[in-house]
Amino acid sequence: MPRMLRSRKVAVGLVLLLALLLLALFGPLLAPHSPDFQANRSSGLPLAPSAEHWLGTDQQQHDLFSRLLSGGRDTLLISFLAGALANVLSVLVGVTAGYLGGLADEVLSALTNIFLALPGLLILMVIMKPLPPAETSDPLLIGSVIAVTAWAWGARVLRAQTMALRGQDYVEASKVIGERTWRIIVFEVVPNLLPILASAFIFTVIYGIGTYTALAWLGVISPASVTWGTVLNEAQASGAAINGYWWWYLPPALAVALVGIALALINFGIDEITNPRLSSARGGRAAKVHFRLGLTPVLRAAGPSSKTPERDEPPSAEVEFEPTAVRSAATGGNPESMEAQS
């Protein structure tokens, strides 16, 4: 069994993510109705979950279970597309800046800092709001726009790691034998950054699904495209939370949260595998230390002289406020010299 799959966090995260991906992939085929199906055009009240409509209906009598199954495909597609494009930009900018150094590093680092300082969600709203509704439903366009605001963090991390790698012996040996710069970057530097790239990709996908859902909830995405975010937007606009229509907004919100939890578990597992300090700290001697709020844990040394007073005991007034205690400390604890001073 691969080492990564032996991690319980990675295994749980992969199973959960696989189930959600299958749901997004085959959900529209398994849905009992089309996303635009209306159960009853004469009623304007949402119906609670029942045997006929498992997750109830919205105000327009759409079957919410069918819209939940149909809404995951675009959401996950855009998120993973944004993660992939952002990773490509991060490698191009971050690794190039870290390896070349000099003026190229200064220019690319300044560009990275500018994108780090920009408010991503606000920039996306400014870019996408003037677009026609048909273009805001294009997954490739939306994924590309989200990637533009998501690459800077990964580029900063990759630049720092590349600066540490460019002085290694195997990189110097490649320079000595005359390998070209792009070949050294692609075949010598980038393969040693794969754990960081995997972590950056997962982080960017989480950012992508959160950003796309937020844009849809704010009404920037065309309501004609049925996604988890547009369902949340319709629920918010109709006051579902105030009127107690929980079946309207809770299932898509849980779906978004489950995707984020699955990716976060995978990311935590990768961190533990690639960073031995985390696994040794949780499985070694430090695992027996019980942390208490407000106290710093200290490992007690063997021997009777190492016995320390209980930390929960309140300090005595004599030790804390008596001036003799201060004199004792100043005179090395000799009572006779202390009396002579008094």
Image (cartoon, rainbow, N blue to C red):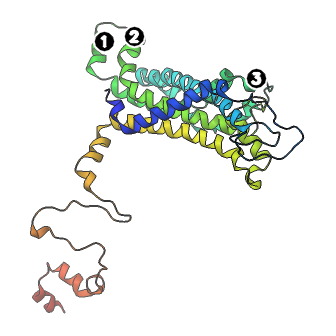
Residue receiving disc 3: 135
Residues at discs 1 and 2 in contact (Cβ within 8 Å): yes
Q: Going from the N terminus, do you reach mark 1 or mark 2 first?
A: 1
Give me the residue at 75% from left, 55% from top.
242
Compute the Cα span from label 2 to label 3.
38 Å
Q: Is 16 in front, or is 311?
A: 16
Which mark sits nearer the N-terminus, 1 or 3? Answer: 3
| Numbered disc 1: secondary structure | helix
Q: Position of residue 100 (x, y in %)?
A: 42, 20
Name the residue nearer the viewer: 228 or 210: 228
Q: Earlier in the sequence, mark 2 or mark 3?
A: 3
Q: Which mark is residue 183?
A: 2
Q: Please identify, in this view, whether the residue under mark 1 or under mark 3 is nearer the observer.
A: 3
Q: Position of residue 272 (x, y in %)?
A: 35, 38
Whole-number angstrom distance, CA of label 1 to CA of label 2: 9 Å
Q: Is residue 154 visible in this depiction of the protein?
A: no
Q: According to the image, label 1 marks what residue?
A: 174
Answer few, some or many: residues within 10 Å of disc 1's Cα (few below 14, many 20 plus, some between 14 and 19): some
Q: Is residue 34 above or below residue 118?
A: above
Q: Name the amino acid, label 1.
A: Ser
Q: Is residue 54 visible?
A: yes
Do the numbered discs 2 and 3 sit on residues whose CB atoms are within 8 Å?
A: no
Give me the C-alpha separation between circle 1 and circle 3.
Answer: 47 Å
- Secondary structure state at the residue bearing disc 3: helix
